[in-house]
Amino acid sequence: MSEKTHDLEGAYALKTPEDSVDYYRDWAARYDRDFAADMVYRSPETVAEAFAALGGAGPVLDVGAGTGLVAEALARRGIAPIDGVDISADMLAVAAAKGVYRATIRADLTAVLPMENSVYSGVISAGTFTHGHVGPDAFHELLRVAAPGAVFAVTVHSAVYEAGGFAGQFATLEDRIEAFRTEPFRIYGLAEGEDHADDIGWIVSFRKR
């Protein structure tokens, strides 16, 4: 693997939205090479495939868009338009340059989002609901901006699914969502024995009622 000044452990140690802004500022230009390629990062393709299989369609909100890996996977499947939201302007600049987004929106996913109600037919995310990033309370805002019937497909790291309150939060949303499902997957395509080779995530999918 290439030498890095930023790594997964550093990303997992983030505590606040400001920490994320600072950390990803310097990592943005190298993220696709130093992380996604080196770690054989499977989440973007896996969640895009799940979204497409559920009949997901645009307009889609890509939550925690980063450098646009999820949007690229959606675009390969002919799904558009896609808006990306992320707290890091530097990551969004990389994403916007790929030409796969209708719009990129800098916003704090732990706060009120700058979108109108019921504007998205789909909500997708990879790698955002994990250690040190965005917690389960964000789903209240994501449901607000999603239209009735909107398809959700997001990854949640298995280590925070229960401990981080995601399972409990989804249980409280039963009257607002339907067709709830979880499927495990391997986050990285690393060789057996490498660090994080056995890391497991959940593809969480449902529709807004």
Image (cartoon, rainbow, N blue to C red):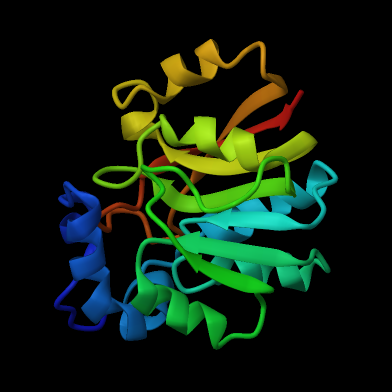
In the rendered image, the vertical position of residue 31 relative to residue 85, given as above or below = below
Q: Nearer the viewer, residue 175 or 187?
A: 175
Q: Where in the figure is residue 166, as x and y percent of width and height?
A: 42, 25
In the drawing, does residue 99 fall left or right of residue 54?
left
For the point 34% across and 71% down, the residue is 35
| Residue 91 appears anywhere in the view | yes
x, y (%) of residue 27?
27, 77
Q: Quadrant of the N terminus?
A: bottom left
**Residue under the point 27% across and 43% down:** 131
Q: Quadrant of residue 144?
A: top right
Q: Is residue 9 left or right of residue 147?
A: left
**Does residue 130 appear to the left or right of 78 in the view shown?**
left
- The percent coordinates of residue 164 (x first, y second) are 31, 27
One can see residue 38 in this view = no
When asked about the image quadrant of residue 142, the answer is: top right
Q: Residue at x 28, y 54 (%)?
A: 193
